């Protein structure tokens, strides 16, 4: 897919989402939690494409969010459209890291950057398990490169 903005080049999953009037808070800009929802939507789309999204409610192996951080660069206001990119940056034994970048169409710039850590969980036993090989291979194919953990990543 051709990136809709140069800042999203290299992101295998990019989605477009409208900014809704109700996304704004009393300060007149999109509330910080909405950015995390946008990233969540892109993350789920990525996991669906990688074949790593479990049937809901999950009863087998699937990902669960372990950590999230977000750096807000510029406020977004209604009306606007945002483009949200998702990519895996590394895979450990039982966890993997994802990066999300949000671009405002109106501002024509990156407005936020988020990093997440997901853990592979066996929901039936409530225990972490290794990232399945088929999911690892699907993510590497989507990314077009090997995803070897530089740091210990198994939480």
Image (cartoon, rainbow, N blue to C red):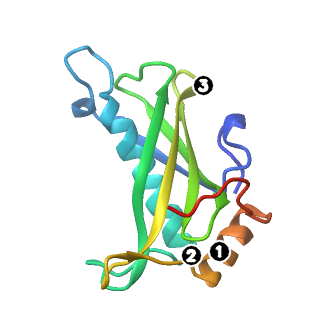
What residue did someone put label 1 on?
Answer: 136
Determine the CA span between mark 2 and mark 3. Answer: 34 Å
What residue did someone put label 3 on?
Answer: 109
Residue sitting at 68 percent across and 35 percent down?
A: 7
Instruction: Name the side, left or right, on which 95 lies relative to 12.
Output: left
Position of residue 60 relative to residue 83, above or below, is below
Pinpoint residue 8: horizontal percent, then vertical percent.
67, 41
- Residues at discs 2 and 3 in contact (Cβ within 8 Å): no
Sequence order check, earlier mark of 2 and 1: 2
Pinpoint residue 60: horizontal percent, then vertical percent.
37, 85
Q: Give SS at disc 3.
A: strand
Q: Give SS at disc 2.
A: loop
Sequence order check, earlier mark of 3 and 1: 3
- Closer to the camera in the image, 4 or 31: 31
- Closer to the camera in the image, 127 or 80: 127
Pinpoint residue 98: horizontal percent, then vertical percent.
57, 52
Quadrant that contains the N terminus: bottom right
What residue did someone put label 2 on?
Answer: 131
Task: Between label 2 and label 1, give the one nearer the viewer.
Answer: 2
Residue sitting at 46 percent across and 34 percent down?
A: 70
Determine the CA span between mark 2 and mark 1. Answer: 7 Å
Task: Between label 3 and label 1, give the one nearer the viewer.
Answer: 1
- Closer to the camera in the image, 108 or 65: 65
Residue 6 has which mark? none
Pinpoint residue 137: horizontal percent, then vertical percent.
69, 77
- Residues at discs 2 and 1 in contact (Cβ within 8 Å): yes
Density class for disc 1 (Cα within 10 Å; few <14, some 14-19, many ≥20) is: many
Position of residue 21 relative to residue 123, above or below, is above
Residue sitting at 63 percent across and 65 percent down?
A: 92
């Amino acid at each position: 897919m051709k990136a809709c903005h140069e800042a999203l080049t290299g992101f295998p999953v990019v989605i477009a989402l409208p900014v809704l009037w109700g996304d704004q808070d009393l300060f007149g800009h999109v509330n910080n939690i909405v950015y995390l929802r946008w990233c969540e939507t892109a993350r789920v789309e990525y996991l669906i494409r990688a074949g790593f999204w479990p049937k809901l409610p999950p009863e087998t192996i699937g990902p669960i969010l372990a950590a999230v951080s977000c750096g807000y660069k510029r406020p977004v206001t209604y009306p606007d459209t945002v483009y949200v990119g998702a990519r895996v940056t590394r895979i450990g034994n039982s966890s993997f890291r994802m990066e999300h970048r949000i671009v405002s169409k109106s501002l024509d710039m990156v407005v936020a950057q988020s990093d997440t850590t997901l853990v592979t969980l066996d929901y039936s036993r409530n225990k972490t398990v290794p990232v399945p090989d088929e999911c690892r291979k699907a993510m590497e194919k989507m990314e077009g490169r090997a995803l070897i953990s530089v740091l210990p990543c198994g939480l």
